[in-house]
Image: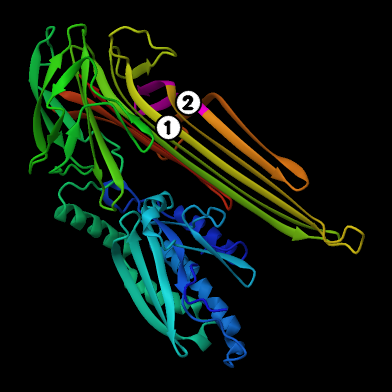
């Protein structure tokens, strides 16, 4: 077999201890070394092994164990990066059961996963990480050459690379040393990624650092905040990145739209002219708002679609009230990503059992709000049904829910009996997705302690399929309501904080928190941010 074009990472048995090491390294330190307090996530794919498999005809069959060890180098490089850069980068392993954006190869009974060769699906790779770790191993006679790259997830632009050589006959027992030669050239990786992002934004003024704005980067300042029917007011727009740097050349729109399945609210209660503006060198633009005749209040809502420094789609938000009486205003964002995978492979004297299961869930939610009452304890919600009036709701919100699950069973009879060799298989797939139906947001604060509670309700469309040996295939669809409660508390969550500070003549509350749960088979991460301004 010639693997000159093999596409090859994680294995079921080979890499299991390595995955444990990677997950353990995630929690080693809690500092955030990336831009805007974001830790870069790197998907550690395998390397393209372009070294031909040893064979008897060539007289190299003794090198087969050494050749097989070439497939181990990718995971060792990932592990050493995770250990060296602990707390500053996160290494993830793409699942070998997900073939949507990966390619699989079996070598010696093990399954390896590598980057696909088709560049058209590069956007899909961003679900594995912000950056991709990939490479290749070639040879000239008995000398092998290792080439490693760190690429952006969507544009596949090279951030940094490394190259080293070694002898094929000396691979066994020296994998760690070979990997370390490459890792040393990539280090300090977190710093190189940070500088790369800043350089990209400096060169391309409109690029943002991250795809989805955590904050409120579009600042809208109307000349008048109180208008009569059909009255107009000019307003200015300032578009800034997550670190406060102005973004030039960003197109800004005011209509309702969608972004990768996420609903983006548009201006309500009036109209904006022109419908699109472009920011100048200082990240600023101007437009005019007119209050509609039937409206008593309005919200100017703006969004700016574009690209981030990794070539992925990005969108920034902002809004401002007209005629709304309020004592506090703010926004809240929440994201959740959860994945789990379990593999069981065993046999006894009569039966061989194999099971693999994989599950992924993601939730994105964002809302802006304006309200009256005490700032230290606020409660806002959207009703189950729209009232039909022209009043602006308490929350301008959007959110999506996605879930995917795969289960596969295979049983093989291996006993010396009449049924020897009989194989049964069973596959179950389930997916569901939906948009936010309604929600409520609660915030309480007293003497440095407080909590956020979210109650998110999605209308979810579900589908499932069932296939089994000797049974007819089945499929079904349904629709139901999904409730997703969220609770962050400063007394219970060590990574949740509330900061109260004076900014000019206003008081600002900044609330941030993260909850993580990592085990051998489970990885969950939930993040919330809330900013409240006291008028």
Quadrant assignment, res 190: bottom left
Question: Is label 1 in contact with label 2 (beta carbons under 8 Å)?
Answer: yes
**What residue lies at 63% left-to-right and 39% top-to-bottom?**
465
Quadrant assignment, res 17: bottom right
**Residue 368: x %, y % from top left:** 30, 24
Magenta stretch in the rendered image:
438-460
| In the foreground, 243 or 499 | 243
Residue pointed to by mark 2: 458
In the image, residue 341 sits, relative to residue 514, either above or below, namely below
Instruction: Say if residue 289 shows up in the picture.
Output: yes
In the image, residue 324 sits, relative to residue 272, either above or below, namely above
Q: Residues within 10 Å of mark 1 (few under 14, many from 20)?
A: many
In the image, residue 291 sits, relative to residue 312, either above or below, namely above
Whether the magenta-drawn stretch holds residue 14 is answered as: no
In the image, residue 52 sits, relative to residue 350, either above or below, namely below
Report the coloring of the rendering.
rainbow
Which residue lies most toward the right here?
417
Sequence-first disc among 1 and 2: 1
**Residue 302: x %, y % from top left:** 21, 29
**Which numbered dot is residue 400?**
1
**Residue 104: x %, y % from top left:** 54, 62
Q: Is mark 2 on a helix, strand or loop?
A: strand
Locate the C terminus by quadrant. Answer: top left
**Residue 87: x %, y % from top left:** 39, 55
Q: What element carries label 1?
A: strand
**What residue lies at 44% left-to-right and 79% top-to-bottom?**
178
């Amino acid at each position: 077999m010639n693997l000159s074009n093999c596409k090859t990472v994680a294995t079921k048995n080979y890499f299991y201890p390595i995955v444990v090491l990677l997950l353990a390294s995630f929690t080693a330190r809690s500092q955030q070394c990336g831009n805007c307090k974001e830790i870069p996530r790197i998907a550690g794919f395998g390397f393209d092994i372009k070294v031909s498999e040893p064979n008897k005809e060539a007289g190299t069959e003794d090198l087969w164990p050494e050749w097989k060890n070439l497939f181990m180098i990718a995971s060792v490089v990932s592990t050493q990066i995770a250990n060296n850069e602990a707390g500053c980068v996160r290494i993830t392993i793409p699942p070998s059961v997900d073939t949507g954006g990966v390619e699989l190869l079996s070598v010696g009974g093990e399954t390896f996963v590598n980057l696909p060769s088709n560049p058209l699906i590069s956007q899909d790779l961003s679900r594995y990480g912000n950056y991709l770790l990939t490479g290749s191993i070639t040879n000239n006679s008995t000398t092998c050459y290792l080439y490693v790259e760190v690429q952006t997830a969507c544009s596949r632009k090279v951030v940094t690379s490394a190259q080293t050589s070694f002898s094929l006959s000396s691979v066994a027992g020296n994998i760690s040393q070979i990997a370390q030669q490459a890792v040393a050239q990539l280090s300090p990786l977190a710093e190189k990624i940070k500088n790369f992002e800043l350089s990209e934004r400096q060169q391309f003024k409109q690029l943002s650092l991250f795809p989805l704005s955590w904050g409120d980067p579009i600042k809208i300042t109307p000349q008048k905040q109180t208008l009569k029917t059909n009255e107009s007011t000019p307003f200015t727009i300032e578009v800034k990145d997550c670190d406060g740097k102005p973004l030039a050349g960003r197109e800004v729109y005011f209509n309702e739209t969608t972004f990768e399945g996420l609903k983006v609210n548009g201006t309500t209660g009036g109209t904006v002219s022109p419908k699109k503006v472009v920011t100048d060198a200082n990240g600023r633009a101007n437009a005019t708002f007119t209050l509609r005749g039937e409206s008593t209040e309005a919200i100017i809502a703006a969004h700016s679609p574009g690209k981030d420094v990794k070539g992925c789609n990005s969108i920034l938000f902002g809004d401002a009230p007209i005629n709304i009486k309020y004592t506090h205003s703010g926004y809240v964002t929440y994201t959740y990503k959860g994945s789990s995978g379990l593999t069981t492979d065993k046999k006894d004297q009569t039966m061989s059992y194999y099971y693999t299961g994989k599950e992924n869930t993601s939730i994105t939610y964002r809302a802006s709000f304006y309200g009256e009452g005490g700032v230290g304890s606020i409660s806002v919600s959207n009703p189950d049904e729209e009232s039909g009036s022209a009043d602006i709701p308490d929350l301008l919100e959007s959110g999506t829910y996605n879930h995917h699950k795969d289960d596969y069973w295979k049983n093989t009879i291996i006993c010396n009996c009449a049924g020897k060799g009989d194989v049964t298989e069973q596959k179950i797939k389930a997916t569901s997705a939906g948009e936010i139906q309604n929600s409520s947001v609660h915030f309480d604060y007293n003497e440095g302690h407080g909590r956020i509670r979210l109650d998110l309700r999605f209308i979810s469309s579900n589908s499932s399929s069932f296939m089994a040996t000797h049974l007819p295939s089945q499929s079904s669809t349904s629709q139901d309501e999904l409730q997703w409660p969220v609770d962050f508390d400063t007394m219970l969550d060590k990574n949740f904080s509330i900061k109260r500070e004076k900014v000019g003549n206003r008081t600002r509350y900044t609330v941030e928190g993260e909850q993580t749960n990592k085990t051998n088979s489970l990885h969950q991460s939930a993040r919330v941010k809330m900013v409240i301004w006291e008028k």
